[in-house]
Image: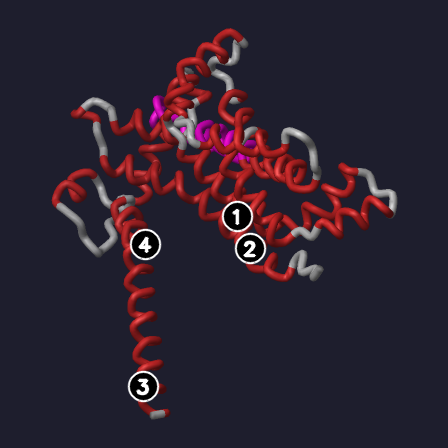
Amino acid sequence: MKESNERSGLGFTIFVHVVLIFLAFLCLFFFYILLINSTRNHAMIQKGFSFIPGKSFMINLKNVLADANIPVVSGIKNSLIVSGCSAALATYFSAMTAYGIYAYDFKMKKPAFIFIMLILSMPTQVSALGFVQLVTKMNMINTLWPLFLPSIAAPAVFYFMYSYMQSSLPLELVEAARMDGCGEFRTFNRIVLPIMKPAMAVQAIFSFVTSWNTYFIPALVISQNKKKTLPILIASLRSADFLKFDMGKVYMLITIAIVPIIIVYLILSRYIVDGVTLGGVKE
């Protein structure tokens, strides 16, 4: 009986590992295709996929950097500014909003929570026209401000922070800080935020990636080349004239675009692992 249980357990373990390896292969295979195609020229890509890298990596890179209509350096800078500011504003102010609703008792607490959740269900496209009109009246067209300032109000990030506080932030800890004479902002910045670091790292990654890949709003607000973000530049490169269209340049630009995302993930992922032991205060 014992041997049969051990065999069944071993079989289940092998099955789980096979499934995980298969899922990892599916996730990484598309990155492999991207990297391979970035080393091949347009003619080679048109022939079909190949597992063998080409010899046009530097040529594609030079073509992308030399294209006057595709300011890659300024596009990377603009995307970094927008994505970095969006991630910082979304995580900090959403954590502050979640803390305010979680740690305080006031008359409109439940209606405020419901109102934020209703905003979460509203698609971006519904409010796009009004948003563009507001940005135009505020003379913010062709500026980066409208691309990251709305991140202060991020309902999805708020809900994640609120749920994390319910499971990891004892109110006794907050009360103890208040009894010791600690101010509310100091309590939030010195006590609550370190406990929230794992959740903030996760949401910073998601917010950064979401903002980095956003095309819809930047396309409505930005028209100047020097202010465009990378998704707009990639779309403009893909919509180029048929005779000038170069798939090698497209894949190279997409490869350049995913490098900062990987770097941000590698920087913040350690906080997710280390944060398992943070805030381990038992009631």
For residue 119, which numbered disc appears in the image?
none
For residue 272, which numbered disc appears in the image?
2
Q: Is residue 68 magenta?
A: yes
User: Cβ–Cβ below 8 Å for labels 2 and 1?
Assistant: yes
Q: CA distance from mark 4 to mark 3?
A: 30 Å
Q: Choose the circle earlier in sequence order: 1 or 3.
A: 3
Q: CA distance from mark 1 to mark 4?
A: 19 Å
Pointer 3 local density, CA inside 10 Å: few below 14, some 14–19, many at least 20: few
Which residue lies under the disc numbered 3?
Answer: 7
Prevailing secondary structure of the magenta residues: helix
Taking depth in this image into account, of 223 and 147 the one nearest to the observer is 147
Is residue 81 in view?
Answer: no
Marks 3, 2: nearer the viewer: 3
Q: CA distance from mark 2 to mark 1?
A: 7 Å
Where residue 219 sits: x, y (%)? 38, 21
Q: Choose the circle earlier in sequence order: 3 or 2.
A: 3
Is residue 88 in view?
Answer: yes
Which residue type carries mark 2?
Ile
Where residue 190 sits: x, y (%)? 75, 46
The image quadrant of residue 104 is top right
Which residue type carries mark 3?
Arg
Q: Is residue 34 magenta?
A: no
Side (left or right) of 192 relative to 208: right
The residue depicted at 40 percent of the width and 35 percent of the height is: 213
Which residue lies under the disc numbered 1?
Answer: 202
Which residue type carries mark 4?
Cys
Q: Choose the circle earlier in sequence order: 2 or 1.
A: 1
Identify the secondary structure beneath mark 3. Answer: helix
For residue 27, which numbered disc appears in the image?
4
Identify the secondary structure beneath mark 2. Answer: helix
